[in-house]
Image (cartoon, rainbow, N blue to C red):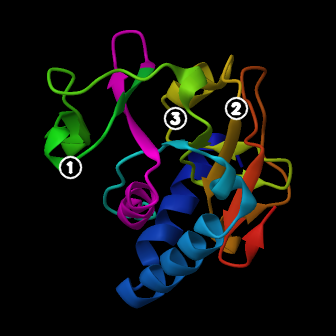
Amino acid sequence: MDKPQLRNKAITYLKSLSDNEKQSIEEKITYQLIHSDIWKKASSIGITISQGFEWNTKAIIDAAWKEHKQVSVPKCNPVNKELIFYQLDSYDQLEVVYYNLKEPNPDISQATDKDRIDLLIVPGLLFDSNGYRVGFGGGYYDRFLTDFPNSTISLVSNNQIVQELPKEKFDLPVKYIVTENGIY
């Protein structure tokens, strides 16, 4: 299968989960993440604001704030397909943009240098055992990761891990994958 077919298959799986199944997996993934050494060592977290069928990131953001970690969330620049992360201290700093995404409002948020993010939680739909992923197809994270110096991790159900994915020269793997069963 090519990437668009794999992407559609993963989205179909995620949308097929009942609310109870999804919540149970999210709670286990969140537990595995926030009790890991990777999490404990990080003083700043980069993470997306989830929506729809994506794994809910609110509990992770709330846990980071509770532990006094700096939280930064991305804003997409669709003209040059780049991500700019902004410090998030309150959900009130978010605005609704295209595709109903919630992103930081740059007028009331401070930009975060990428090297100041200790742990970047990278979204994706499918992953292989080497950390390569099929994302949402925009290439934003692949561009951002080219010179990202710190740890990367993705939130993944066991059902989103496949043996091997098609790779292109610009694809970059994440260092860790957290599932409902642990971190790999």
The residue at the point 75 percent across, 51 percent down is 176
Q: Is 160 one of the magenta-colored residues?
A: no
Q: CA distance from mark 1 to mark 2?
A: 25 Å
Viewer-closest of 76 and 91: 91
The residue carrying mark 1 is 91
* Magenta region: 57-82
- Image position of 117 with respect to 177: above or below: above
Q: Is the residue marked by circle 1 packed among few (<14), some (14-19), or many (20+) residues within 10 Å?
A: few
**Label pair 1/2, CB-CB below 8 angstroms:** no
- Image position of 141 with respect to 161: above or below: above
The residue carrying mark 3 is 137
* Callout in the foreground (2, 3): 2
The residue at the point 70 percent across, 65 percent down is 36
Residue 97 visible at all = yes
* Callout in the foreground (1, 3): 1
Looking at this view, name the residue that lies furthest to the bottom: 20
